[in-house]
Image: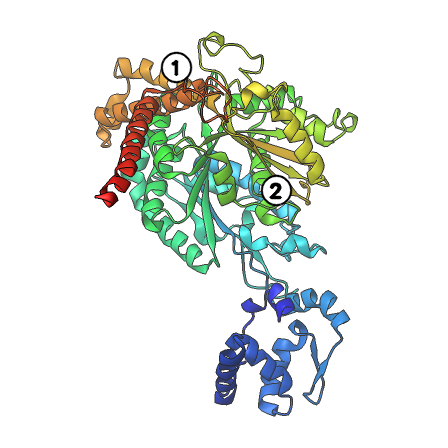
Amino acid sequence: SSHLGSIGLSQCNLAALPATRGCRAHARGRKGRRGRSAAAADMADAMSTTQRPDMVGSLGGTLAGVAGMGATATGALQPRSMLDLRPEGVASEKSLGVSCRSGREMIQIQVGKAGCGIGHEFLRDLVEEHQIEYRGDELRGTFFGQDFALEQHLDVFFNEGAPHKASGRNRWVPRCLLVDLNMQDLAQITSGPLGHLYRPENLIGTDEGSGNCYATARRQASPIIMDTVEDIVRKEAEKSNCLQGIQFTHSIIGGTGSGLTSLILSELHDYFDGNVMLQSFTLFPGPNFCDMVVEPYNATLAMKELMEYCEQVFVYDNAALSNICQKSLRSAVPKRQEMNNIVALCMSGITSGMRFKGPLNADIWKMNQNLVPFKGLHFLCSSFAPLNSEQSGPYRMKSVLDLAQQMLQKDNYTCTCDPLANIQGKAPETIDGKPPARVLASWASWRGSFKTQEVDRILYDMSRPGSRFDNLYPDWIPNPIATNVCAQGHCNARDSVVYVTNNTRVTEVFEHMMSCFDKLFSTKSFVHNYKNDGVEESDMFSARRALDSLKADYDSRAKKGDKIYKGEACNPKAKVDPSMLTKDEVELAKLVLQYSKELFWAEQDEPRKEKR
């Protein structure tokens, strides 16, 4: 019974098992005596009761392949050997149309033109890694691979659809929603062969348009389609075995990606009451790469929902992606598809632990626990390795050390900041007049034939005391780098690594947004467009103040020294250095000291009272 449970027998249709009252009664009695479940007892009764012709007919087709039993022409069940059970258990499961459920389903919501483009490239990586046919019309959406490991966890991002009439194979449908306020952009995404995989009901949009304005998308156009989005998400959640989270791909530069996504985030957070993780792969405004004039307003207003409702936000910007295409990929004129593909590479590596088996597996909850040490500081920087052109690829050895060196390079980060600003060990006040770069926490997701022992050794050498990167990692987080090793390589890059860091220098992205916002808002430029759609000046000022508070929180963590004691860090008798503590921490220390003194004298008075 343990072997049958491990291959997903719980998903089989066992309606025919407790067919008679005697089976139910016998199962209840057996459960009471031995503690076995009713389903297991019913199966044992069915396998032992071969004389009943009415049960043989109903159980022969159900248990023939799964339980390793063969039905003969006379209806008798012939047992197979245990050696045949192992290789044929998987094949028989496929023949019955029963899939192993991972219990880690994800719902993806792609919002706006940029979000749909990024999600489309991510879907391309998914179908190529899991070997799902999408080019031919006859077998579109079917699994054509031979390795069961590729199909085992398809249900993380796919639903099982109706089988094809010609081949009888099951169709796999992406569990994602495409939402936009411009139907022409949706039609362009779904026009290719890959676009036919989407379920037509999950393409949600209108021709209202947002006019590149957050307020128009949030207050006017979005409520028209919000009910449809919430209804489809509810149905997808009810069909899931154990919904783990919902992830968004969007941009906060335009109106649809900022306004519509903000509304969806707030509604879904209230609907699930915070029990489902919401994470976002977000395109931020980049320096010297401006698509529209009012992008500082849109980005600043959208940040409020990202801070309040998302558990983790992966930061990207077009300036950094364009720089990667030009320097690393040797592309003279970067195309939008190439830039979207870099984000898709990071998304594929981040979610690989949920989709494939490996020595060290992980899910988004485990990632969140290791990447967000302080509440609210969940804006993460990503880098990918290897990133090189086709000409230089054969000259690179993809070892653990080589990939670790490349993933730490500044040019490989997908957002415009200086993540290595503290690498030379300068004083915090002398680094560009800003707080130093400190890695609060980090996560390395490895894909390929890597040994965990070698990975742990290389990553330990990176953060050990006295190393080149020692100044980046604070001493008050002893093990700042978490790892995940997945045996299945990427479909194109093969052996690769995605490095995600909670770096305090992400504030450079916020500073750029606030600087542009202040210039526009100082003269009240374009504010009337937002007022017409219900966004007041007080709302804009409140969003700007929340962004400044987020930056201050990151800066306070960056300024915190490694040693909070004058003596050894682990010496409890050493005196506290007040200069290394914040004002709130000093007040808290005084209260603790006062309380401990009162507690000490209270304990001294107890024996005296007993004497009296």
Of residues 310 and 40, the one drawn nearer to the viewer in this rendering: 40
Colour convention of the picture: rainbow
x%, y% of residue 308? 34, 36
Q: Earlier in the sequence, mark 2 or mark 1?
A: 2
- Quarter occupied by the C terminus: top left
* Residue 481 image point, x, y percent: 57, 32
- The residue that appears at 73% across and 41% down in the rendered structure is 449
Residue of label 1: 579
Residue 563: x %, y % from top left: 48, 20
Q: Amino acid at mark 2?
A: Asp
- Residue tagged 2: 125
The single residue placed furthest to the right in the displayed view is 395
Which structural element holds mark 2?
helix
The single residue placed furthest to the front in the displayed view is 611
Query: Hey, which quadrant is residue 536 in on the image?
Result: top left
When the figure is inspected, residue 560 is found, relative to residue 282, above or below; the finding is above
Closest to the observer: 5 or 397?
5
